[in-house]
Amino acid sequence: MTAWLKLVPAWAWWALALAVVAGGQQVRVLSAQAVAVGAQRDLSDYRAEVAERDRRAAIFVIQENQRRQAATEKADAEAQQQLAAARGDAERAGSALERLQQRLAAAEQRSRDAGNSITAQLGQAAEDAARMRADMLGRLGEAVRLYADIADQRGIAGAACERAYEGLRGE
């Protein structure tokens, strides 16, 4: 068999060795290309996964903002309703105060209309006391209206703020 090998010229051996080395290189290049294609596919899959996560996160943010906005608007609407109810109560209280003042004024007028001098003197004293009571009641009524209005506004605003905050937190 070695005789056979001697018949093959030296340049053929070199060509064979070169072909084997080049073939090995070709195998390595093809292997590297296969790895590159796999890596490119993995990169493409990763990008698609990241894009899907970003899309889901954006949808979640939009939905969360809409939920928070709705909670804030609901708290505001409830506060407006409560303020309207408080104003109605204040108007009813104010009209009750006016009726009381009218009754005091009528009682004062009746005491003035008395024809007897003793009754007139007593009526004058009663008139002065009634006038003082009516004046004091009117001043107190105005102060009560002012403080009640402020208390209603602040209490309702505070409760609305709490509801809005709880709505933002998702409670």
Image (spheres, helix red, strand yellow):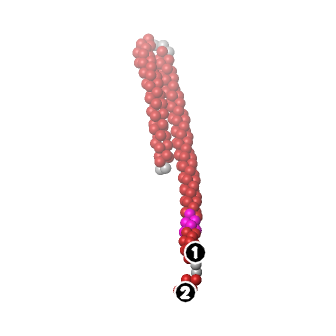
Q: Which of the two residues, 146 or 170, is positioned nearer the viewer here?
A: 170
Residue 125 percent across, percent down from the top left: 41, 15
The residue positioned farthest toward the bottom in the image shown: 1
Magenta-drawn segment: 28-36
Q: Which residue is mark 2?
A: 3
For the question of whether residue 146 can be seen, the reply is yes
Rendered residue at 53%/33% (across/down):
87
What kind of element bears circle 1? helix
Residue 37 percent across, percent down from the top left: 58, 64
For the question of whether residue 49 can be seen, the reply is no
What kind of element bears circle 2? helix
Query: Label 1 vs label 2: CA separation?
Result: 17 Å
Rendered residue at 55%/35% (across/down):
84
Q: Amino acid at mark 1?
A: Trp
Instruction: Mark 1 and mark 2 in contact? Answer it, CB < 8 Å.
Output: no
Q: Which residue is mark 1?
A: 11
